Image: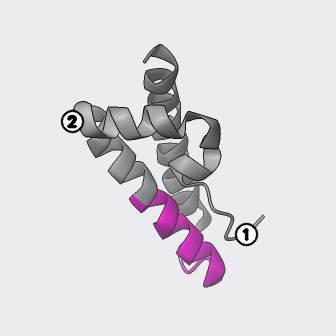
């Protein structure tokens, strides 16, 4: 769905306390969470504007978001 919110707290609301704790106490997690949410916002805005970039660039952005999400989820589950 175009423009869908994939922010970290929206994707994992059941882990909100863990996300908050990790963001406060783990600088690598905090930085990657910030990068993930920034990238998600960029993708969402591009989608809502009709994808003003080519498909390869959009796929690269989405791939990078997925990699960050996997890393963040792994940290959440191991906390």
- Residue 76 image point, x, y percent: 48, 26
Q: Helix, strand, or loop for circle 2?
A: helix
On-image quarter of the N terminus:
bottom right
50 within the magenta span: yes
- Residue 62 image point, x, y percent: 56, 52
Q: Nearer the viewer, mark 2 or mark 1?
A: 2
Query: Which disc number belongs to residue 2?
Result: 1
Q: Helix, strand, or loop for circle 1?
A: loop
- Residue 23 image point, x, y percent: 32, 40
Q: Quadrant of residue 13?
A: top right
Q: Quadrant of residue 43?
A: bottom right
The tag earlier along the polypeptide, 2 or 1, is 1
Query: Which disc number belongs to residue 29?
Result: none
Q: Residue at x 73, y 69 (%)?
A: 2
Q: Residue at x 56, y 34 (%)?
A: 15
Going by the picture, which residue comes out furthest to the front?
17
Between the residue at mark 2 and the residue at mark 1, the CA separation in whole angstroms equals: 31 Å
Q: Residue at x 34, y 32 (%)?
A: 22
Q: Residue at x 69, y 64 (%)?
A: 4
Contact between marks 2 and 1 (CB within 8 A): the answer is: no
**Which residue is under mark 2?**
27
- Residues drawn in magenta: 38-52
67 within the magenta span: no
Callout 1 crowding tier (Cα within 10 Å): few <14, some 14–19, many ≥20: few
Q: Is residue 49 above or below residue 11?
A: below
On-image quarter of the C terminus:
top left
């Amino acid at each position: 769905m175009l423009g869908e919110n994939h922010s970290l707290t929206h994707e994992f609301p059941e882990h909100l306390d863990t996300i908050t704790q990790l963001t406060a106490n783990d600088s690598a997690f905090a930085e990657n969470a910030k990068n993930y949410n920034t990238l998600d916002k960029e993708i969402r805005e591009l989608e809502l504007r009709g994808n003003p970039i080519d498909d390869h660039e959009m796929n690269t952005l989405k791939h990078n978001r997925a990699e960050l999400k996997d890393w963040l989820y792994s940290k959440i589950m191991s906390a």
